[in-house]
Amino acid sequence: MSDERGASVEEARVRRVEESRLSGTFSRVGIYVGVALVIFLIGFIPMWLRARENAGQRDAARRELRVSRMQNALASAAVDAARGEYEPARQSASDFFTALREEADLAGNESTLTAAQRDGLRPMLQQRDDLITLLARSDPAVAPRLLDMHAAFRKAVLAVPPEGRQNQQQQ
């Protein structure tokens, strides 16, 4: 009987030693995981901030590109009409008006144009049907109207700088 008690006491001691080793191992693993997480976050946060800044710059460049493409389509229509190439001029003018309509219909941050720019460009949309009809008829009177519209577009867009340019000028 004393042998049995001695064996069970010995087994209990062995179990306690093993449990303490296991709990020590688990706490060490927990510390290592915690340290690894902290190191990961120290490296991740600056990269995340940089990526966020770069995404903002990318979005600003895309907005300016859309405006440039609209201006290019209108200028191309004016040049083609002045050269007597009315069908390419009609296609370019149609592309311009389609892009302008899409931008005018967008609201807030979704639009490339600011609210003031959209308000300044809305009257141009009223001339769409007349200009497309004149181009389809190959009427030479359309060239000066397209040139005037191009000048008005530039004035409306450049009079109110986009948000990206305003932020750069303030810095």
Image (cartoon, helix red, strand yellow):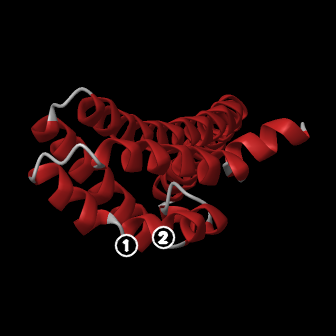
The correct choice, above or below, for 153 with respect to 60 in the image is below
Q: Secondary structure at mark 2?
A: helix
Task: Give the side of residue 24 with respect to residue 6, left or right.
Answer: right
* Residue at the disc numbered 1: 126
Whether pointer 1 and pointer 2 mark residues with C-beta atoms closer than 8 Å, the reply is yes
Badge 1 density bin: few <14, some 14–19, many ≥20, Cα 10 Å:
few
Q: Report the residue at 57% width, 54% height from top.
A: 9
Residue 102 location, x and y as percent? 34, 64
Picture coordinates of residue 113, whole percent (x, y): 55, 57
Pick the front one: 5 or 126: 126
Q: Give coordinates of residue 30: x percent, y percent.
A: 63, 43
Badge 2: how crowded within 10 Å, few (<14), some, or many (20+)?
some
Q: Is residue 19 placed above or below 105 in the rendered structure? A: above
Residue visible at 18% across and 31% down in the picture: 84
Q: Is residue 101 above or below residue 36?
A: below
Say whether residue 54 is visible.
Answer: yes
Position above or below: 92 against 16: above
At x 48% / y 63%, what residue is drawn? 110
- Three-letter code, disc 1: Gln
Q: CA distance from mark 1 to mark 2?
A: 7 Å
Residue in view at x 89 percent, y 42 percent: 170
Q: Position of residue 21 (x, y in %)?
A: 60, 39
Q: Amino acid at mark 2?
A: Arg
Most foreground residue, 139 or 153: 139
Q: Quadrant of residue 109?
A: bottom right
